[in-house]
Amino acid sequence: MVGRLTVLCFAGTYALALLSDLARFVVRSSVRWYVTVGLTALGWIVHTVYLAQLARVGGELPVTTIFESLLLLAWILAAIDLYLVVRSPRTAAVGVFLLPVVLTLVTVAGLWAPRTNSAGSGTVGPTYFWGMVHGIFLLLGAVSTFVAFVAGLMYLAQSHRLKHKRPSRLGFSLPSLENSERWNRGAITLAFPLLSIGLAIGMGLILAHARRGGRELPWTDPKVLFTGVLWLFFALLLHARYRPEMRGRSVMILTILATAFLAFTWVGVDMLFPTVHGAPKATIERPSPPAGRLP
Amino acid sequence: VKLLAVGVDHRSAPTAIREALAFEGPRRREGLDALKSAFPGHEFVVLSTCNRVEVYVASDSSARVPEVADLATWLAAFHTIEATILAGHLVAHHDEAVVGHLFRVAASLESLVLGEGQILGQVRDAYHLAQAQGAVGPILHPLFQNALRVGKKVREETGMDRGKLSVASVAVDVARDVFDTFRDKAVLVIGAGKMGDLTLQHLSELRPGQILITNRNPERARAAADKWKGRAVPFERLDDALIEADLVVSTTAADEPIVSYQRYASVQKKRRNRLALILDIAVPRDFDPNVGDLDQVLLYNVDDLRAQVERNLAGRRKGIDPAQAIVERETVACLADLRHQHHAGALLRQLGDYADAVRVREQEALYARLGHLSEADREAIAHTLRRLQNQFLHHPRTALRTAATSPAPIGQAHPLLSAVRHLFGLGDEPTSRTGKDHR
């Protein structure tokens, strides 16, 4: 419950920062920029302290549960948002696109918040190490994917405005199409190898577990199956990225779909299907699935 | 405090008069030096732009303050023109009206092109030059700093400087929304007429990597290519040039579209579907309007660009009322501050004079009663009384100095100043003159 309250605390600060950023459409004063940056920074500091506390109590990097990974992903994206907004305050309304993503991730993480403090898995050794590496690579792949997603959204918004010859709104500037496309291409190019390495390590762990006769994650586990489809989806996306006829809008839409599928594989599968992947730590209670959902 | 602004602008004087009165290059510095020599003890700023020449004068001294006629004579003498030429063209603003006028100028509300961005920089340059020449003091310093702040605030809060007001410059803005860098881009101009030349003039500020020019008349294409350090392409090889180009400006006088949908679709395939921006500013249009439906292709015709200009102008006009409200609010606050600082300074002097008078009077009365005192005793008593006076006045003076730097309440005297006046019986506060006239 304490964890959920703390998450609510910085989620609320990010929500206020987003409101302040959205106020750009009506408030022209430069004070609004300072309020937005101040609130984002405040939320990010509380977020950082909370993650540090999780790492200290758990004695490991907070990437071992969905809750921790989502929080860490949101933390990295919030840092990217802060960096971009502070580095070039007038160039583009990045926060309008990035902060909702951060807020959504934190809110979803809140649903998975532990009700008691975790004391860590207590496991050490090569399996533990490679499990962490597996989590880190997948997390970095997810960061790249979400960056590509935000760049794609900005591309589509700018492209729609230019195609329909609409003037840019006062206080709401977007990056050039070329810039958004470059960010999208770079992020996808980076996301694919990161996800591939993460998934390869995951498969290695399944094989190692099976060989030692430990807890086995079957190849038919929904998480494993959906992850395989996800990898194929990203391979297709990377291929499309470099196909001339798939440039621009099509790739951006494909990126958005890929991000949605990644989010589903990461969080949705655990909520909708029975899976033994990433079994929770002994002292962490999995959230009760909302009424009407599959256990 | 006395303030005066005298000058001409695009409304009050024709170009010839404005040119005759302009302070160009080193003449600005010379003008400030000459003003300081002609009217010592005053502060000056000279603002000289294409559409405006103004001399701002401020004075806190009791010495003779220059009148409009004095400045008109000085302007005519400095520029060696007949003073009679200026008759009916000079506009003068007095005292409080100077503040509002300067703020309106800095906010670009007085500019020929509403919301133009250059004027704020020109006001800043004029102020910095006057500062470097030692021509500004305690009155014009805060006044110009406030003007720069108000100019910036108006632009930030109303967006009045936003959006270009010519077809060619709007085209540049669109190009910036599409491409990030231009060093690796090729610009193709189809047609070597005046419009193409004008658009290239604006596009050249983007420093494109390559400029290609094609025209039915190869001679004209070569001439334009030489002028813009580009490459002339034979008109028969238009497709090759279209494949190479990222940004196309089409300005031919052809009666029919020269690039059909099918033709450009084939070009775009060969371009490997790279992002392309086509600015079709020819009338009738050179590109089939359906070309704009192709993915990764943005087609703007002259009507689209003109519509954008109209929207930008309407946007700027929409900013006038909020801008005026900001200027009025800031003028009132600035005047209150100026008046307040002036009153606080005057009150400090008045308080010192009053205390000196009381001390000297009592000291003389004491000396008269104690006639036997030696010169050394008298000096010791005088020293003690001065110290006593300074100690008594130390806290009131410190409080007044602090009050002088804090924002003044608008429309009324600062309570501390009123209290000091009341407690020491120093009388009421002075009033100011305001207005604008044409000479």
Image (cartoon, coloured by chain):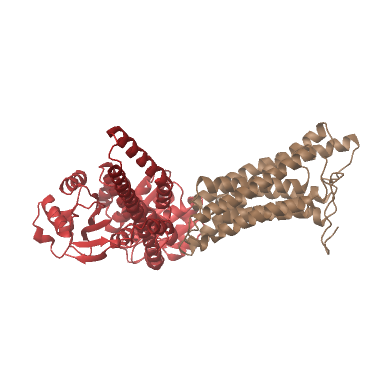
Residue B337, compared with residue B222, is above or below; it is below
Most foreground residue, A83 or A5? A5
- Residue at image coords 86%, 45%: A283
Most foreground residue, B98 or B376? B376
Q: Residue furthest right?
A: A213
Q: How many marks?
A: 0
Q: Colour of chain A?
A: brown
Residue A88, percent from left and from top: 50, 47
- Residue at image coords 30%, 41%: B370
- Chain ID, red in image: B
Q: Quadrant of residue A256?
A: bottom right
- Residue at image coords 61%, 43%: A189
Residue B379, percent from left and from top: 30, 35
Residue B255, compared with residue B32, is above or below; it is below
Question: Is A28 left, or right, of A128 in this rendering?
Answer: left
* The C terminus of chain B: image quadrant: bottom left
Residue B235, percent from left and from top: 33, 53
Residue A202, compared with residue B294, is above or below; it is above
